[in-house]
Image (cartoon, rainbow, N blue to C red):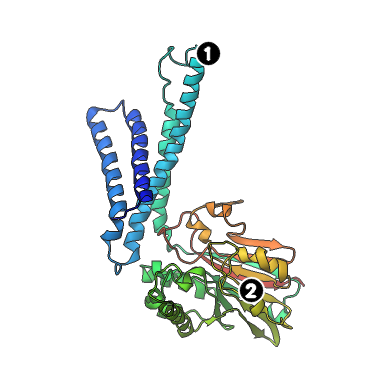
């Protein structure tokens, strides 16, 4: 069982949260029959107790050799319940603050509170109470529904125009993939359907911007044959993301960790992917050239590593008039690319997943991740430079997606002439 003061403080907070929310459940059910109240109250505490016990014993319910998915689902359901209660509690707390202010003012000015006699408690607002319940229930429902979206691949198509794109590359079809996270997959057939969508786009070039696995190279073993099917006339190229280095795993030695990384590199080679490790490669077509650069993970955020070396990848430059950079973390773009490498025309990134939670409506795109990343999904432009951020092919942590569906991007390049 887990120990430590923080853990017990956290469990105590969850228990207090349950009691707080229950007061509103009891208030709203006061008009129901005795039997209905008994069923409702009993169900509430049964679910709350089960979620607390599961959270407490989750590390012991599954061995290390058990698949990650069952643990992820259980944890997501527990976290969803907690978030739902927190959201509901926000409404309840707003109402309690209102009641407290009304009571305080009524006592201060010796005037009876609105809707009651002097000295009588201020009634709880039915509107805010029901609003809180609906908001919490709605959030939990969305998170549960989102688990069915984890393989619902969407194809995004965009057309980009550049002054300096060589004429031989006019109309170039580039498929951009990112964040596969093979360690989260449990449905081989569903992943295959996603890859069939990629091949149906008939790309000239396929570019993958990192996070092939969650933690270790062996996660990719069941899917090597599938991803080996990805072929394109001009090649399949990739870079590493922060998860590919296995920094989030405890290793017995640095040699063991390095061996895991070498295994991951070998897997990409077996699949026919050309992994770019702080290097560049010239892509030729019709006697003309463009330059493809790939860097290891480089982030402007302190909690993520800087293995990338764009200066090394860029080298002395190239006579190629058009340059594409693959860099996993989109914070790299403004922090270094736009500042020091203004002749890099297009940067491709991933990493954010759109937080796997958000809203996409005509003219509206929102996700909590935008408060952490200025560039987090879709197309961004600064002067003549462009960045595209893919929200990811896979998923990690929460085994689902709400709003931000798994993405396959087709980018068609055109000259402005």
Q: Position of residue 280 (x, y in %)?
A: 63, 81
Picture quadrant where residue 187 is located? bottom left
Question: x, y percentage for residue 306?
Answer: 57, 70
Relative height, residue 127 to residue 402 (above, below): above
**Residue at position x 57%, y 52% from top?**
371
Residue 406 seen by the camera: yes
Q: Decide: is 288 above or below 341.
A: below
Provide the secondary structure element on which disc 1 rests: loop
Give the position of the C terminus as an image quadrant: bottom right
Asked where in the image residue 292 lies, by quadrant, the reply is bottom right
Residue 293 location, x and y as percent? 63, 77
Label count reads 2
The answer to the question of whether label 1 and label 2 lie on touching residues, with beta carbons closer than 8 A, is no
Residue named by callout 1: 109
Residue 393 placement (x, y as % from top left): 48, 67
The residue at 58%/59% (across/down) is: 376
Asked if residue 212 can be seen in this view, the reply is: no
Query: In the depicted view, which residue is nearer to us: 288 or 293?
Result: 293
Q: Is residue 183 above or below residue 405?
A: below
Q: On the rendered image, what quadrant is the N terminus found in?
A: bottom left
Residue furthest to the front in view is 5
Report the side of 232 relative to 216 (left or right). right
Residue tagged 2? 325
At label 2, counting other C-alpha atoms closer than 10 Å, the crowd grade (few under 14, some 14-19, many 20 or more) is many
191 vs 358, left or right, is left
Question: Which numbered tag is attached to residue 236?
Answer: none
């Amino acid at each position: 069982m887990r120990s430590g003061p923080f853990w017990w403080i956290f469990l105590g907070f969850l228990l207090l949260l349950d009691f707080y929310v229950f007061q509103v459940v009891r208030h709203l059910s006061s008009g129901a029959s005795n039997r209905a109240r008994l069923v409702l109250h009993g169900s509430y505490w049964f679910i709350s107790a089960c979620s607390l016990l599961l959270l407490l014993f989750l590390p012991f319910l599954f061995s290390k050799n058990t698949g990650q998915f069952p643990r992820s689902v259980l944890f997501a359901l527990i976290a969803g319940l907690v978030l739902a209660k927190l959201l509901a509690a926000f409404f309840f707390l707003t109402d309690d603050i209102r009641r407290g202010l009304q009571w305080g003012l009524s006592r201060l000015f010796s005037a009876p509170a609105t809707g009651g006699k002097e000295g009588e408690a201020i009634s709880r607002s039915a509107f805010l109470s029901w609003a809180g319940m609906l908001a919490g229930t709605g959030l939990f429902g969305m998170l549960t529904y989102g688990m069915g979206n984890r393989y619902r691949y969407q194809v995004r198509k965009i057309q980009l125009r550049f002054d300096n794109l060589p004429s031989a590359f006019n109309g170039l079809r580039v498929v951009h993939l990112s964040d596969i996270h093979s360690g989260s997959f449990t449905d081989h057939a569903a992943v295959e359907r996603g890859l069939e969508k990629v091949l149906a786009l008939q790309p000239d070039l396929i570019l993958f911007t990192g996070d092939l696995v969650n933690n270790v190279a062996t996660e990719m073993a069941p899917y090597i044959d599938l991803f080996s099917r990805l072929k394109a006339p001009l090649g399949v190229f990739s870079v590493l993301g922060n998860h590919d280095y296995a920094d989030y795993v405890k290793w017995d030695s640095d040699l063991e960790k390095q061996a895991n990384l070498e295994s991951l590199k070998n897997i990409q080679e077996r699949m026919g992917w050309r992994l770019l490790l702080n290097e560049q490669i010239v892509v030729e077509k019709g006697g003309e050239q463009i330059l493809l650069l790939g860097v290891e993970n480089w982030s402007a955020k302190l909690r993520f590593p800087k293995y990338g070396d764009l200066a090394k990848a860029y080298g002395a430059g190239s006579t190629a008039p058009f340059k594409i950079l693959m860099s996993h973390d989109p914070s790299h773009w403004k922090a270094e690319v736009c500042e020091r490498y203004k002749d890099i025309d297009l940067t491709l990134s991933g990493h954010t997943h759109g937080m796997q939670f958000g809203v996409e409506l005509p003219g509206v795109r929102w996700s909590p991740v935008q408060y952490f990343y200025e560039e987090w999904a879709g197309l961004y432009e600064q002067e003549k430079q462009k960045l595209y951020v893919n929200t990811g092919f896979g998923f990690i942590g929460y085994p689902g997606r709400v709003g931000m569906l798994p993405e396959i991007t087709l980018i068609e390049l055109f000259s402005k002439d």
